[in-house]
Image (cartoon, grey):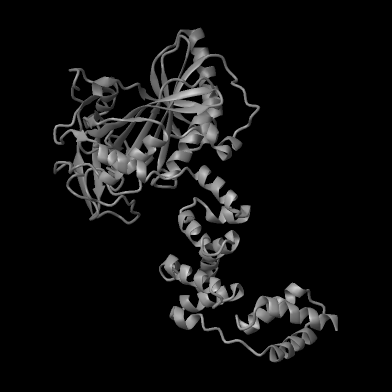
């Protein structure tokens, strides 16, 4: 079970002096995040392509009645535009995305990632779920609907301002990618259609812009700790907000959590002005970069939902849930706390980044208890070699197993720490490990003579300056300690 209050690093990102700046408001957050796996209802890869597609199809879509027998208001609005839709697609797309073939069974990896997120947010997993169709007639789905299913409910996160409930966590398909819009025509690409999205919706328990930001930051930490896609366009954040006496308004288009406070504050002011003019309506608005919003469409309702008839009920077994619990990834903030406790410097913690290699780091630390040396060998030296020698996919050459062998050689006295980089360079260039660790050592009296020549030719350098020249000349054939001792001896003469 995860609690915001237990995450010191997370709370450190917030200003402890922040106080809610408005009276009572009702607000909730919806977050849609792409998962790092293949498409949700077929095996096509989740890749966005920049090359020109060779194929296209044309469609027209129409609004129809949902399960309640009513046609959704937002669907009616879109259908009234009577546009033609052109769908561009690639050889990495299939008939499922074109709506010419029934959907395949749900992506089980996406389901497991979703369960990880649900467990971090203290949710109850739904044992049996009905996959639903959500009517969408803006052209972003070839079928005219989006498949969605609720996976978990009744979670919560704790904030400085009180508990915020998690209403539901769902899995759904991402929409097609808009390429061009013009009078009467919209052009989409199918490379994004069907990428799995996790949808996280909070209850309307948020009472201030500051609390909304706190919740969004924490959920973001949870998402980045799990297997999600990263980068621009992989996450979308919406806020639902209403003040007393005003209908609910949904604001879409948040890419940056920093915009939560100014946008919500401006929306509260806008709703306060609406109350004075008796101009009240429930609607969807888009967040602008300047913190204001603009009208998008009427608020959709439940009339656009109806059951998916091409797929069976989704059964989430106790075995799947237990497996998710056993493989639950740690929060990034908790991993960083562990890094600090292990003795890593802040510089090395920054180098460790998201902590993907932290388990390997801990395993290597059991061989030699020198955290900064281990981090340097595991992460820094391979990057330096790859950059200097222009070697691609260095991690496939200097694998964790190779690095473990190098560190064991240091532990067993077969290799000195100062020689590690030289050995790794030789392995990266193709030498076998057994040959690479055979370091030819010079006679110290011979080395002393060479160092004396360097000092004579370059007088006035610092010890560090001489060390750089010596180590470059002998490339691992003398230890750093011996070189330092000889340099000090010569300088003091």
Q: Residue 128: x percent and y percent?
A: 22, 31
| Residue sticking out furthest to the right | 493
Q: Is residue 160 above or below residue 363?
A: above
Toward which corner of the image does residue 252 lie, by quadrant?
Answer: top left
| Quarter of the figure that contains the C terminus | bottom right
Q: In this image, 490 relative to 351: left or right?
A: right
In the image, taking residue 182 as reference, residue 245 lies left or right, namely right
Q: Residue furthest front?
A: 412
Please give the name of the residue rendered at 54% of the width and 78% of the height, measured from the top-left corner: 414
The residue shown at (59%, 21%) is 20
Question: Which one is nearer the viewer's eye here, 245 or 4?
Answer: 4
490 vs 407, left or right, is right
In which quadrant is the N terminus drawn? top left
Whether residue 174 is visible: no
Determine which quarter of the picture holds residue 282. top left
> Looking at the image, is 231 positioned above or below residue 130?
below
Report which quarter residue 153 is drawn in: top left
Residue 338 x/y as whole percent: 54, 48
- Of residues 54 and 458, the one drawn nearer to the viewer in this rendering: 458
**In percent of the image, x 56 and y 56: which residue is there?**
351
Residue 359 in the image: state x and y as whole percent: 46, 55
Q: Is residue 138 above or below residue 106?
A: above
Q: Is residue 2 visible?
A: yes
Residue 275's x, y, as percent?
49, 9
Q: Is residue 3 left or right of residue 100?
A: right
* Residue 407 vs residue 84, the one in the foreground: 407
Task: Please give the name of the residue rendered at 61% of the width and 83% of the height, measured from the top-left corner.
Answer: 477
What is the total number of numbered labels drawn onto the structure image?
Answer: 0
């Amino acid at each position: 079970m995860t609690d915001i209050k237990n995450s010191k690093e997370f709370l450190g990102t917030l200003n402890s002096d922040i106080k809610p700046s408005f009276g009572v408001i009702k607000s909730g957050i919806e977050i849609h995040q792409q998962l790092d796996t293949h498409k949700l209802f077929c095996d096509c890869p989740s890749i966005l392509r920049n090359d020109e597609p060779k194929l296209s199809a044309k469609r027209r879509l129409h609004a129809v009645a949902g399960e309640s027998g009513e046609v959704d208001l937002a669907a009616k609005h879109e259908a009234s535009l009577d546009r033609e839709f052109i769908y561009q697609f690639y050889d990495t797309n299939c008939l499922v995305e074109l709506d010419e073939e029934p959907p395949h069974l749900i992506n089980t990896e996406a389901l497991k990632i979703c369960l990880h997120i649900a467990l971090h947010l203290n949710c109850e997993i739904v044992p049996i779920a009905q996959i639903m169709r959500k009517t969408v007639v803006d052209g972003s789905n070839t079928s005219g609907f989006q498949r969605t299913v609720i996976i978990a409910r009744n979670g919560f996160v704790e904030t400085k301002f009180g508990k915020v409930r998690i209403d539901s966590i769902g899995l759904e398909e991402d929409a097609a990618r808009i390429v061009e819009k013009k009078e009467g025509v919209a052009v989409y690409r199918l490379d994004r259609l069907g990428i799995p999205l996790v949808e996280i919706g909070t209850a309307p328990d948020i009472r201030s812009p500051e609390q909304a930001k706190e919740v969004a930051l924490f959920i973001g930490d949870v998402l980045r700790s799990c297997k999600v896609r990263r980068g621009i366009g992989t996450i979308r954040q919406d806020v639902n907000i209403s003040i007393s006496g005003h209908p609910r308004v949904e604001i879409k288009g948040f890419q940056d959590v920093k915009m939560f406070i100014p946008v919500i504050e401006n929306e509260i002011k806008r709703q306060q002005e609406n109350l004075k003019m008796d101009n009240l309506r429930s609607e969807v608005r888009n967040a602008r970069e300047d913190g204001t919003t603009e009208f998008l469409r009427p608020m959709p309702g439940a009339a656009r939902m109806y059951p998916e008839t091409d797929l069976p009920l989704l059964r989430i077994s106790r075995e799947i849930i237990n497996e998710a619990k056993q493989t639950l990834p740690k929060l990034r903030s908790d991993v960083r706390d562990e890094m600090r406790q292990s003795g890593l410097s802040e510089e090395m913690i920054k180098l460790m980044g998201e902590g993907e290699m932290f388990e390997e780091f801990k395993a290597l630390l059991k061989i030699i208890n020198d955290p900064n040396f281990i981090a340097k060998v595991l992460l820094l030296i391979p990057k330096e070699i790859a950059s200097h020698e222009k070697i691609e996919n260095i991690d496939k050459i200097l694998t964790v197993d190779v690095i473990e062998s190098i560190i064991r050689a240091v532990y067993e006295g077969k290799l000195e720490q100062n020689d590690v980089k030289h050995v790794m360079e030789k392995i990266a260039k193709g030498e076998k490990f057994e040959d690479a660790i055979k370091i030819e050592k010079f006679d110290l009296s011979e080395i002393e003579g060479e160092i004396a020549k360097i000092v004579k030719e370059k007088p006035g350098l610092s010890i560090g300056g001489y060390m750089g020249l010596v180590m470059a000349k002998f490339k691992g054939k003398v230890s750093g300690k011996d070189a330092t001792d000889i340099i000090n001896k010569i300088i003091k003469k």
